Amino acid sequence: MKNEIEEQYEFMDKVNELNKGKELKYSIFTMGCQLNENDSEKICGMLEKMGYFRVDDTTKADIVVFNTCCVRENAEDKLFGKIGEMKRQKEKKGTIIAIGGCMMQEKHIVEKLHSSYPYVDIIFGTHTLHKLSEDIYKILEERKRIDDVIDIDGEVYEGLPIKRVDNIKASVTIMYGCNNFCSYCIVPYVRGRERSRRPVDILNEVRNLAKNGYKEITLLGQNVNSYNGGENYKFSNLLYDVNKIDGIERIRFVSPHPKDFTEDVIEAIKKCDKVCKIIHLPLQSGSSKVLKSMNRKYTKEQFITLAEKMKERIPNVVFSTDIIVGFPGETEEDFEDTLDVVKRVNFEQVYMFIYSRRVGTPGDKMENQIPEEIKHKRFDRLKALVESGISVNNQKYIGTVQKVLVEGESKNNPNMLTGRTDSNKVVIFEGTKDLIHSVIELKIVSEHMWYLKGEIM
Ligand code: 5AD
Ligand code: SF4
């Protein structure tokens, strides 16, 4: 019996046949996290197999795909604005409009699309992405709108074509979904329960990437350190096995959960020389009271102890983090606890967010919501603290020698090259183009807030 993905390849061939000699084009907009970007690479892979060529200019496209995110509110306005703009093009040249991703798993969004944007052709969810080829085939054949969203957790499908955006760094999704139900977060409702890919499939994908010249791998999942490959094969086992693959020079992973940094994971990070020693440790809040109502399962003290333990065990480790300000019930004192943790842990990078109410989450139903003005003021205070820390932190690089993975020409200055340190800092330096895609040692000579300047030694 054919499996689902083989069937989809048949649909890709059929669409390709229908499109023969037509030079059709597609555009894609991706919102949200790296997981969504990785999903978009699969969407692009399918579209190119169907014979579409990518263009950036939407007005030239015959099919436009939106891959949406719903983790914060502002993405909704952006999406509806863009779809509104598509209406005339749709009427003029019959462009196919397909909208997928996390937001499509929310009923109220799909209802709004039906009522206000009836010209959208395909709505697909996070569990049906692999069927996009079938959906497009049906649109071409039958020209009636398709809703392809299911609520049950999708299976883990292997073998979809993929068109990667980068040729040196690649993302590899290792698990789908989330079981944590942090009370601010919509993800468990739109991505379903945790499902891990089989170790053999992940390792084969990474081996293939290495063969094709990729040097840096980012392992992706909503909660990577609870990866469960079966038969007691855990995240730490995966780190050791990816670390053994020749050709791969750097391994990163996002996003882990502080509660799942078990001894074996810490030991693996320490022992695997390719695992970058910048670890994402999402704090969310520094107040034990807020953390409890966020359902984060650790206290302020436990978080600090974990960071300190990792600093002791893993030489030169640094941390990045995510912080939400203005969660319901957050008092001035609670917020100051967050500032306190930021000062004490000295994060290398902080991703800051203003709390955004998400329909269907417990946080949305909490009564003590924080007024917008206070949220913004706190956000600005946190930002000022973080930025003052960056230049101080940058100073410690000056005079050091850093291994830098050279990514290409600098966007702002084509005479210079750009790359990143193990700790993910951008380094700009003068060098010849043959260095692109190699890992070289640079002496850091100055810091400029968002980047460092280096010199070849
Ligand atoms: N409001 C603001 N930020 C959020 N995040 C998740 N949900 C929300 C929300 N409702 C942030 C968290 C998470 C990151 C990916 O997005 O910090 O770690
Ligand atoms: Fe956005 Fe979360 Fe979906 Fe990623 S998984 S696209 S952050 S809602």
Image: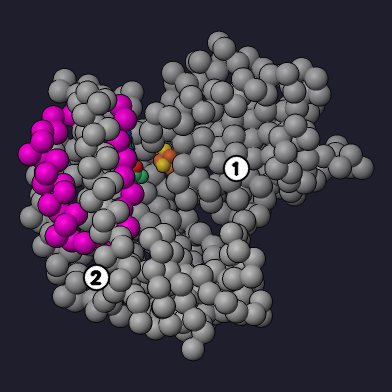
The reply, left or right, for residue 330 in relation to residue 249 is left
Residue interval drawn in magenta:
328-357
Q: Is residue 347 magenta?
A: yes
Badge 1 crowding class, 10 Å Cα cut-off, few under 14, some 14 to 19, many 20 or more, is many
Question: Viewer-nearest of labels 1 and 2?
Answer: 2
44 vs 16, left or right, is left
Q: Position of residue 401 (x, y in %)?
A: 39, 83
Task: Based on the picture, tell me whether residue 7 belongs to the magenta stretch.
Answer: no
Q: Find residue 266 and name its label.
A: 2
Which one is in front, 37 or 320?
Answer: 320
Report the side of 449 relative to 302 (left or right): right
- Residue 307's place in the image compared with 98, above or below, is below
Q: Quadrant of residue 387?
A: bottom left
Q: Decide: marks 1, 2 in contact (CB < 8 A)? A: no
Mark 1 highlights which residue? Answer: 130
In the rendered image, the vertical position of residue 97 relative to residue 408, given as above or below: above
Does the Cβ of the disc 2 residue fall within 8 Å of ligand 1?
no
Q: Where on the picture, by quarter, is residue 224?
A: bottom left
- Three-letter amino acid code of the residue under disc 1: His
Q: Nearer the viewer, residue 280 or 398?
A: 398
Q: Residue furthest top?
A: 115
Badge 2 marks a residue whose secondary structure is helix
Amino acid found under the numbered disc labelled 2: Ile
